[in-house]
Image (cartoon, helix red, strand yellow):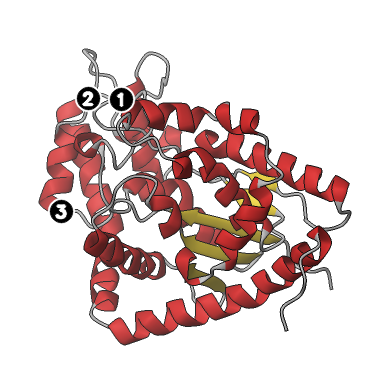
Amino acid sequence: MEAKKRIFSGIQPSGELTLGSYMGAIKNWVALQDEYDCLYCIVDMHAITVRQVPADLRRRSVAQLAQYIACGLDPEKNIMFIQSHVPQHAELSWVLGCYTQFGELSRMTQFKDKAKKHADNITAGLFTYPVLMASDILLYQSDLVPVGDDQRQHVELCRDIATRFNNWFPDTFTIPEAFVPKMGARVMSLGQPENKMSKSEPDGCVFLMDKPEDIMRKFKRAVTDCETAVRYDPENKPGISNLLTIYCAATGKTMDEAEADFEGKGYGIFKPAVGEAVVELLRPIQAEATRLMADKAYLESVYTQGAQRAQALANRTLRKVYKKVGFVPAK
């Protein structure tokens, strides 16, 4: 029987999980868990490129795991763990940093963007962030990396680093490919529909654990246009098109069905209907996440066992890398 392809992905616990994270990533992960060998990581080491409140980071890391499970990720089928619990990520990152060119990192679009936003905190960690991301992926000999458009450049750099290393030391790393699941919904900001929904812009963002009344308020305030027709037209009607995308993802309806539902009805009916669909979608997820957060022992067992399983895989790669670069093996 052919071995399953391996998928690695992770989300930073630098803020609460968003509706965009769920519809664009986590929902797809659930659909992949039977077909692929999956590792899903809470990338807390990446999160500290921006200053964090330590107690909040710890709370969010565990809450994110609870929400992963509440969304349908099975800890038996997937390896789920906290990045800092597997020190091999940092160890491999140092080695790969020695095979990454300064110019390559200087060209990273996300570094330029974040450096503008955090001009008072442009750290070496922010600059070398893509090397740690490459280590995350290559450590597990990952075949596929589910990504959005904003991370494609990082996956390309990861491929370049792996290829360069393999040219020096053949057959060390699997060369990963970016993977865009067919069913992924690209969810945009409710306030600025030309931008992706982001936790850094809370006014236009719905969080996975938002109260129903807050969700409804955000959808009622969503930016639309001066027309009244509910029609999918991303170029001319980005706000309405985004709301239609969310409605379809929440209800399972096709775009044609969604447009038919609101034909002849105004935005005053459409926007609350989208909000209600999202409230109902998230209701069982929120209830299960709340239940899991009350069971600290269970969550601890999940992330402990996940780290142990991840370390077993990571050690194989790291031992191979250390041997190839000439390090004396530890006894």
Mark 2 vs mark 3, CA separation in Å: 19 Å
Residue situated in front as seen by the camera: 327 or 184: 327
Amino acid beneath label 1: Gly
Quick check: can you spot residue 148? no
| Residue 31, horizontal then vertical, whole percent | 55, 60
Residue 36 position by quadrant: bottom right
Residue in the picture at 75% in, 65% down: 322
Residue in the picture at 25% in, 24% down: 264
The residue under label 2 is 223
Proximity of marks 1 and 2: CB atoms separated by less than 8 Å: yes
Q: Is label 3 in a helix, a strand or a loop?
A: helix
| Residue 94, horizontal then vertical, whole percent | 61, 54
Q: Local crowd at mark 2 within 10 Å, few (<14), some, or many (≥20)?
A: some
So how many labels did they put on this image? 3
Residue 139's place in the image compared with 273, above or below, is below
Which quarter of the rendering shows the C terminus?
bottom right
Residue in the picture at 57% in, 65% down: 39
The residue under label 1 is 239
Residue in the picture at 20% in, 30% down: 222
Task: Tell whether 210 sits left or right of 149.
Answer: left
Task: Tell whether 83 sits left or right of 207.
Answer: right
Q: Is label 2 in a helix, a strand or a loop?
A: loop
| Residue 76, horizontal then vertical, whole percent | 54, 80
Amino acid beneath label 3: Pro
